[in-house]
Image (spheres, rainbow, N blue to C red):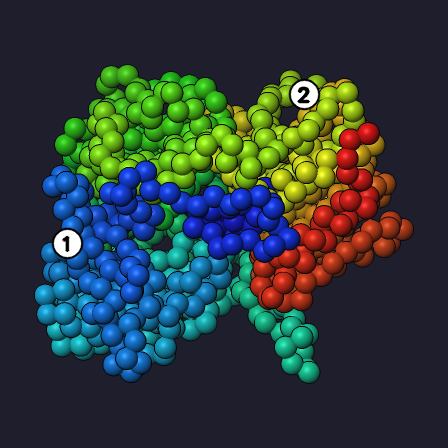
Amino acid sequence: MNQLKLIRICALMAITAIQIPLNAQPLPEHLKIQKPFFSMKKVDENAMNFSQLQWNKDGHLFTLLNELSNGFEIAEYNPVQNFEKKILVTSADLIQKETAKPLPVESYTWDPAKQVLLLFSNSKRVWRENTRGDFWIYDVKTKALRQIGKGLPASSLQFAKLSPDGLKAAYVSKHNIYVEDLQSGKITQLTFDGTDRVINGTFDWAYEEELFCRDGFRWSPDSRAIAYWQIDASKIGNFLMINNTDSIYSFTIPVEYPKVGFNPSKAKIGVINIEATSTKWMNIPGDAEKNYLPRMDWAGNSNELMVQQLNRKQDSCKLYLINAQSGSAKNVYKESDAAWIDLNYFWQYDRTGWDFINGGKEFLWTSEKDGWRHVYRLNRDGSNERLISKGNYDVMDIKGIDPAKGILYFYGSTKNATQQYLYSLKIDGKGALTMVSPANQTGTHTYNASPDGQFAVHSFSNHTTAPQEQFIKLNGHEKLKDGESYRLTAEQIKQYMPNPKSFFQVTTADGITMDGWMIKPANFDESKKYPLLFDIYGEPAAATVKDVFSPNNWHQQLANKGYVIISLDNRGAPVAKGREWRKAIFKNIGVLNVRDQAMATKEILKWKWVDSSRVAVWGWSGGGSSTQNLMFKYPEIYKTGMAVAGVANMLTYDNIYQERYMGLLPQSLNSYKEGSSINHVKGLQGNLLLIHGSGDDNVHYQNHEMLVNALVAAGKSFEMMVYPNRSHSINEGEGTSKHLFQLLTKYLEEHCPAGAR
């Protein structure tokens, strides 16, 4: 159903099957194209690998974790001084007394003022990512290494952060918050009510999955207080997953999971005075069971917080400025939308949803209120709202601010929604929009910008050009150093992707113009007829049609066999086509998106080389849901479908995601019924393969069983595969991914035969 890692990642798996990231492990043999594989090449001997770059909190110094022949090092670089290098620590400095081996560092935080490194190791998975483990402190001056949180359970610490003054570290363990004095090693427990269901400093399943919340506490700038979320999931129902394979007697695995129509977890914000170890709860208006608190941070000082509140329906947003001492809240901004209000996704991980500027006197905010996603500038109290970005284009992702020059940098694309470029504009709203990315590099540009907006790591690729990486000065896009990049000749690309990808547009009978890509066999003969495989997602969480280098070995193998693979972005896809395009799917998932896909396919079937008797569709997660609906609602078009981990009954999915896009019950019940494939099984005429993991904590296995029951009752034939205890990604266990894609390939070949005719 719905991502980058998550259900979104699984959506992207459905889109690209097994896409090759630059740092990927080798593919299983069955997924490899039997052609020479290319490797990372340095443009020159001075090229650097920027993939692990971390900017220091302020300015433009950065650190890298470099692999060495005999270990690793963490080093700091100064781009102003010709990338002058300062080694902070090597693996030889991190010998653990207990093991006499170097600490296996997974990530780190560098405090240059205090010359301290905070190191993360021995991580464990929590829902989607490895967010708990052990933390260590390394003093660069004294070369002393010690573990923090000693005495707490191993690999139980989460989100350890140094205080701004560098004297303390705070972290979460077992849903309670602790602070540790770095000189004395004294550990002070700050909260005591943490349980499996009362969660301090981090979040429950739904907040993490759908609101992108993981790290749930914030140090005050003066290091004297910590603001944090408390999530009360005590009234959330347990969904029981059953494990039948790991013991003779089966056992259940409970997951607190708020379904559609059930109240969400209660959330509140507290501020702990570190010295008094007491919490002051913030007095935020509204019923905690009818509102979400997705974003919170200190409001540019140590006296006030900024908190975002979304109502249950997620069509109304308020910002509160809250006095941290008294807890009193003042509503400084509010807006509503006829559909839903998007979170400021580009601020979802490293920021809060806003940026304070001008010494904290003003802040930047984004809204779709004029039909496009634009940036607004407001006074601290919410007054004097001014539109900064003007025109018929979307600000898709904020990438940096140059406060000295008053410049805002953001991603967008004013002409082609499949591509992405960096633009700049003045924060005062004066002057013209400027495209920063080189105009002669058409495709997708990404930037990792320094906090002061002066420098960035720039990467460019398109569907025929492998990623090229450079360290640049943003002003003027001046290259300062090459990164380690793919440098492939046209012949090498042809060897790795023998079947080329091309982009096209198709306009449906409804007047909707959709972007698409297709992969044709290298020996394509337009005088013959070819089978089609549509690779679909279709829901508001992800787009599939992007002009980016994304070699997909499964697609290439299928094209080698004589299939044409096609993917299309329907209305609702989160692309730079304006609010109306993105919000058209409101209360219409399973209806509008599948109609767009079907009507586009009808136009494609008019192409003279298409074999209309051999049309297949497949998808994962939201793509699985779309596949089911297409097979049931448009059987005259789609003859074969392969649905992986799809939602069959929207009433089984989590409330935050589904209610955002489909509305609340009981008012929207008819929309839920019409969009749920389980209610349309009588339309099935073709070949259908259903695949699910019984341990899916996201799209629960009950969807599979409910759909099976409905198909059986309707007397419909189908095939199915269940992977025991596998999660939504269905990749756990030896041989699982290999087996799954072999199964898909075999089913496709049996029911939608390959090759030109």
Q: Classify 441 as above or below 189.
A: above
| Camera-side residue of 737 and 178 | 737
How crowded pointer 2 is (Cα within 10 Å; few <14, some 14-19, many 20+) is rated as some
Q: Classify 472 as above or below 304.
A: above
The answer to whether 603 appears left or right of 339 in the picture is right
Pick the quarter of the image with the C terminus.
top right
Q: Amino acid at mark 2?
A: Thr
Q: Name the image quarter holding residue 590.
A: top right
Q: Residue furthest right?
A: 715
| Camera-side residue of 351 and 272 | 351
The answer to whether 232 appears left or right of 637 in the picture is left
Q: Nearer the observer, disc 2 or disc 1?
A: 1
User: SS at mark 2?
Assistant: loop
Residue at 39%, 33% (x, y): give it: 460
| Camera-side residue of 667 and 157 | 157
Q: Disc count in the image?
A: 2
Circle 2/circle 1 CB separation < 8 Å: no
Residue at 76%, 45% (x, y): give it: 748
What residue is pinned by disc 2? 508
User: SS at mark 1?
Assistant: strand
The answer to whether 507 appears left or right of 179 in the picture is right
Q: Amino acid at mark 1?
A: Lys
Q: Name the image quarter holding residue 159.
A: bottom left
Residue 224, percent from left and from top: 16, 62
Residue 413, percent from left and from top: 42, 25
Residue 268, percent from left and from top: 37, 58
- Does residue 75 appear in the picture of this structure? yes
Residue at 13%, 60% (x, y): give it: 115
> Residue 86: which disc?
1
Residue 6, percent from left and from top: 51, 53
